[in-house]
Amino acid sequence: MSTFDSDSNGQGLQTRLIHTPPADASGFNALPAPIMRGSTTFFENTAAQRKPVDQLGLDYSYGLHGNPTQYTLAGKLAQIEQAKHCLLVPSGLAAITLVGSALLKTGDHWCLPANAYGPAHSLARLWQSQYGISFDVYDPMDAADLERRLRPETRLVWTETPGSLTFEVPDMKALTAVARARNIPVCVDNTWSSGLHFKPFDHGVDISIQALTKYQGGHADVIMGSVCSNNTALFAKVENINRLWGLGVSPDDCALVLRSLITLPLRHREQAAVAMRIAQWVSSQPEVDRLLHPAFASCPGHNNWKRDFTGSASLFAFTLKAPLADADAVRFVDTLKVFHIGYSWGGPESLALAFDMPANRRQHIGGSTLIRLAIGLEDEADLMADLQRAFAAIRVGAA
Ligand SMILES: Cc1ncc(COP(=O)(O)O)c(C=O)c1O
């Protein structure tokens, strides 16, 4: 259409430029969710504006609280995780902080696994010193250890499966049973599976958080997080504090994630399959001590993965055999050309990082240094050739 009613109706141009409504969208029937921007949203009258807001329903009272693009994305994520409720936050870390701040107050106590995403531990330390919220770190592979650390004032059990960096897969049913026996809510960081291969609410979990920055964003160009739950009372607490923190996500970013979600299962499947083949080959290299990939028997908790997961992801790690040490891991990573050095994972580019083995995992895993690989979408042969060069660079006797 290129025919318009340009009658001024007695109004000035400036007024008309502001108040002319968008083109009629009826009859435009396309798949992509429209990007709906807007800070102020109009009420029909004052009675509508004064009506109490249903925070768990569609809330179009103000752009910060929700818009159709956000709800479309949240609804699809809820489908993936089989959740009743889902909200979006500006990062995976914000999801962690939000859940903690909704469920914990001064005098409370919480438990985190030894292999939790690092900033969760930093947050626990900060809250302990700043707000008097104490915490304990438990061995994720020992439900009895978690049980011993629970206190009458414990109000949250944090879990992650598999754990960050060392990839142990905990017995989630055992951990949640311990917490449930005392009515303590359990939150899982379910980022590794993207919700595709691990269904948290079938395993006694109350709240699941994810960093959508990884596979859901999928193209390394957006940062976002989600909180999903089937427990309405707990979710209402999270939703309430979310509003008071003033957290919101941009509809443009939501549209990026919505576009990527279409290919999420395909990308995830392809990246995981290539990662499996690469991991298998890596494990056969003489310099490698231990492959830490949940789908392999060498990974602690492999049997839990077999029982609870329906697939794997493209992020894994391995340790080097002594006397190879941190300097060798650094040389390995710095030799890579197709893999880049950088944080995050789940995007199209493959990434490598050398980590000092976390002190609290050293006795469980062995080794002093750890290399983490995130497999992207490059040609497999190029990734293999790159890794071959890196192994050659640390081979004993290499110049
Ligand atoms: C397991 C896990 N959870 C949460 C996060 C935080 O996500 P974001 O980078 O979106 O804050 C990360 C980031 O690397 C992660 O690996």
Image: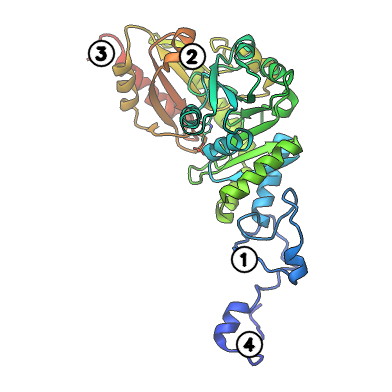
Q: Is residue 108 above or below residue 247?
A: above
Give whichever of discs 3 and 4 has the lower sequence position. Answer: 4
Pick the front one: 137 or 5: 137
Residue 40: give its label. Answer: 1
- Secondary structure category for the residue under label 1: loop
Q: Earlier in the sequence, mark 1 or mark 3?
A: 1
Q: Earlier in the sequence, mark 2 or mark 3?
A: 2
Q: Label 1 vs label 4: CA separation?
A: 26 Å
Identify the mark nearer the N-term, 1 or 4: 4
Q: Nearer the viewer, mark 1 or mark 2?
A: 1
Spatial separation of the CA atoms under disc 1 and disc 2: 53 Å
Residue, disc 4: 6
Q: Residue 248, image x and y in percent?
A: 58, 51
Mark sitting on residue 291:
2
Query: Is residue 326 visible in the rendered structure shown here?
Result: yes
Mark 2 touches mark 3? (CB < 8 Å): no
